[in-house]
Image: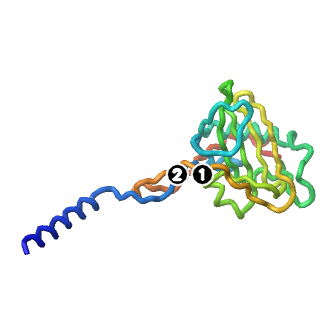
């Protein structure tokens, strides 16, 4: 009887010790930051996030900060209409991208080149069906015309280039070559909803007129 009582007490002590520790929930947290400016909204992906794209003379990756996103958006929006003057893949029912810039949710990925310059790749999507996915991983498609486009901005040279607008046709999602990552498990008591960083710096009305 004493042995049973002793065993029962030991089990209780072990259970209490386990409960006293922080319980780690195996919940996968996507490492991105949501950003919101005066006329843009999107998600910045960390430099460790695997992507299936490259930039010219790429040497590495960096995580864009608020000031980087604001500068990239200002440069891109200033030059987009000129770069898009031919309206490629934007005929008929397809939107002209520079006339509807606020409609697009962005995804931002930072690169560095062999000269040390910072380059931000902007992926722009106007499609309610994939809005939730945009916060989780880079969304790349074929088809969809002016609802899907991307562009590159060199923050050091202030060059905006590499505009690509999807061709017309049904939207098909391009499978990833690599698994999305990284994803991190965090303690339940530390889990918080992803915060939004307000980064807008465009205050002159002439700068937001398209």
- Residue 52 at x, y percent in the picture: 68, 45
109 or 172: nearer the viewer: 172
- How many residues crowd mark 2 within 10 Å: few (<14), some (14–19), many (20+)? few
The residue that mark 2 highlights is 183
The residue that appears at 79% across and 49% down in the rendered structure is 149
The residue that appears at 75% across and 57% down in the rendered structure is 126
Please determine whether, in this image, residue 71 is positioned above or below residue 35: above
- Residue 41 at x, y percent in the picture: 67, 51
The residue that mark 1 highlights is 180
- Residue 129 at x, y percent in the picture: 71, 64
- How many residues crowd mark 1 within 10 Å: few (<14), some (14–19), many (20+)? some
The kind of secondary structure element at disc 2 is strand
Q: Is residue 70 left or right of residue 95?
A: left
Q: Is residue 3 left or right of residue 21?
A: left
Residue 136 seen from this side: yes
- Label 1 with label 2: CB-CB less than 8 Å: yes
């Amino acid at each position: 009887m004493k042995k049973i009582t002793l065993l029962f007490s030991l089990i209780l002590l072990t259970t209490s010790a386990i409960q006293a520790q922080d319980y780690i929930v195996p919940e996968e947290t996507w490492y991105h930051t949501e950003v919101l400016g005066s006329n843009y909204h999107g998600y910045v992906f960390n430099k460790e996030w695997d992507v299936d794209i490259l930039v010219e003379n790429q040497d590495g990756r960096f995580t864009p900060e608020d000031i980087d996103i604001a500068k990239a958006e200002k440069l891109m929006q200033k030059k987009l209409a000129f770069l898009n003057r031919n309206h490629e893949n934007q005929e008929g029912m397809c939107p002209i991208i520079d006339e509807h810039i606020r409609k697009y949710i962005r995804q931002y990925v930072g690169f560095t080149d062999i000269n040390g310059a910072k380059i931000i790749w902007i992926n722009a999507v106007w499609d309610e069906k994939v809005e939730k996915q945009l916060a989780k991983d880079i969304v790349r498609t074929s088809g969809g015309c002016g609802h899907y486009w991307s562009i590159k901005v060199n923050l050091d040279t202030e060059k905006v280039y590499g505009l690509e607008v999807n061709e017309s046709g049904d939207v098909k999602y391009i499978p990833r070559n690599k698994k999305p990552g990284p994803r991190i498990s965090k303690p339940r008591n530390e889990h918080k909803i992803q915060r939004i960083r307000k980064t807008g710096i465009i205050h002159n009305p002439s700068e937001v007129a398209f």
